[in-house]
Amino acid sequence: MPDNLYDRDYYAWTREQAMRLREAGQSGHNSAIDWERVAEEIEDMGDVKWDEIENRLGLLLTHLLKLIYCPALRERNARQWWLTIREHRRYIPKRLKRSPSLRPMARECLSEIYAEARHIAADEAEVDVSVFPENMPFTYDLVMELDFPEEFLPDHMRR
């Protein structure tokens, strides 16, 4: 049965297929199949897509934090941090386009991802976590903005 949901939204397709497999299993069709585990595996395939988005958002936030709040490391690392930030800002929307049902999750979970990124940035920069704001200082749209607003940049990095 052809369904273009697979092409439009892979994540939503994995969830729908898992649900359909469970329903078929409950109705007794093909009882030799371990329907619950098959459904779980399909859900896991979708979860891999979310894990990738979550990881990339975390890396993007970690690099943004170090770039903005770690001036002592900026001279040596700013170029590489900018390249990583731009790479993830380009990649994440492409993945979300393939699985648009993940888009609201990315927005909703950003504060959680930020909290972890804050600690990772502190570890990587070898600074106290208090160097970084406890509450996320920017919105999802701002995090994803290719031309990051200058008011968040240190003076010497402004155009």
Image (spheres, rainbow, N blue to C red):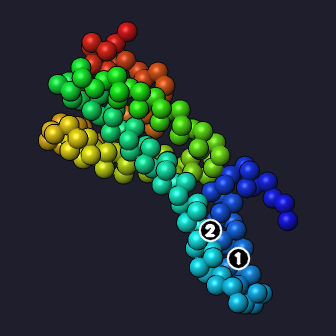
Disc 1: which residue = 21
- Percent across and percent down for residue 148 are 42, 23
- Taking the spot 53% from the left edge, 58% from the top edge, the residue there is 48
- Taking the spot 43% from the left edge, 48% from the top edge, the residue there is 55
Q: Quadrant of residue 79?
A: top left
Q: How many marks?
A: 2
Mark 1: give few (<14), some (14-19) or many (20+) Cα within 10 Å. many
Asked whether the viewer can see residue 7, the reply is: yes
Disc 2: which residue = 42
Mark 2: give few (<14), some (14-19) or many (20+) Cα within 10 Å. some
- Percent across and percent down for residue 136 are 33, 40
Depth order, front residue of 133/25: 25
Q: Is residue 91 left or right of residue 115?
A: right
Q: Is residue 49 above or below residue 32?
A: above
Q: Is residue 32 above or below residue 150?
A: below
Q: Is residue 103 above or below residue 70?
A: below
- Percent across and percent down for residue 25 are 71, 84
Picture quarter with the N terminus: bottom right
- Taking the spot 72% from the left edge, 90% from the top edge, the residue there is 31
Picture quarter with the C terminus: top left
Name the outermost residue toward the right.
1
Q: Is residue 99 above or below residue 28?
A: above
Q: Quadrant of residue 60?
A: top left
Instruction: Report if the CB atoms under discs 2 and 1 are less than 8 Å apart.
Output: yes
Determine the secondary structure under disc 2: helix
